[in-house]
Amino acid sequence: MEATSKRINDREVVLTRIVKAPRALVWKVCADPAHIDQWWGPNGYTNKTISHELRVGGQWKYTMTYVDGTVYPNLITWTEVSPIDRLVYDHGDWENPRMFKGSLTFADVEGGTLITLRTEMPTKEALDMAVEKHDAIEGGKQTLARLAAYVETR
């Protein structure tokens, strides 16, 4: 099933997708960097985890490298960790660790797990730029598709 997206308001976008796998497995591949590095991010990117501590206040420091060789530093700071239910985080880079807020939620549905990816930008202008300049909605859909493809082969 393909991901769906909805712009909630001037600052938020929500993407959802049903993954054909049990919620505990979907959670595991979203919480363990050995798995996350295999699927996180839009098409054309590869990840390398530098450090990962999954706890409130803990951080996931990683790089995303595009096929052209450009390396993008990323930093996620966990603000809520509710095993197999929800991950909430601040997302940025090493110099600006709180560019926007994000969350992943996991729910049992017939046939698998409904995963919801929510992104909240600080302003309407920031969301407009992310959507128009960086194709954030399509990138989110590709990320969830990569997650589904990875999980469904486990």
Image: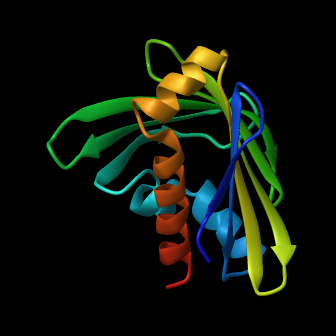
Residue drawn 50% across the image and 13% down it = 96
- Residue 43 at what x, y percent from top left? 35, 57
Residue 133 falls left or right of residue 122: left
Measured along the vertical axis of the image, is residue 74 above or below residue 25? above
Quadrant of the frame with the N terminus: bottom right
Residue furthest left in the image: 68
Measured along the vertical axis of the image, is residue 140 above or below residue 60? below
Colour treatment of the image: rainbow
Indicate the quadrant where residue 9 lies. top right
Residue drawn 36% across the image and 49% down it = 47
- Residue 145 at what x, y percent from top left? 51, 67
Observer-nearest of 145 and 49: 145
- Residue 108 at what x, y percent from top left? 85, 74
Residue drawn 78% across the image and 62% down it = 106
Q: Can the viewer see residue 23?
A: yes
Observer-nearest of 67 and 62: 67
Q: Can the viewer see residue 98?
A: no
- Residue 5 at what x, y percent from top left? 66, 53
Indicate the quadrant where residue 21 lies. bottom right
Q: How many numbered marks does the figure carry?
A: 0
Residue drawn 62% across the image and 24% down it = 100
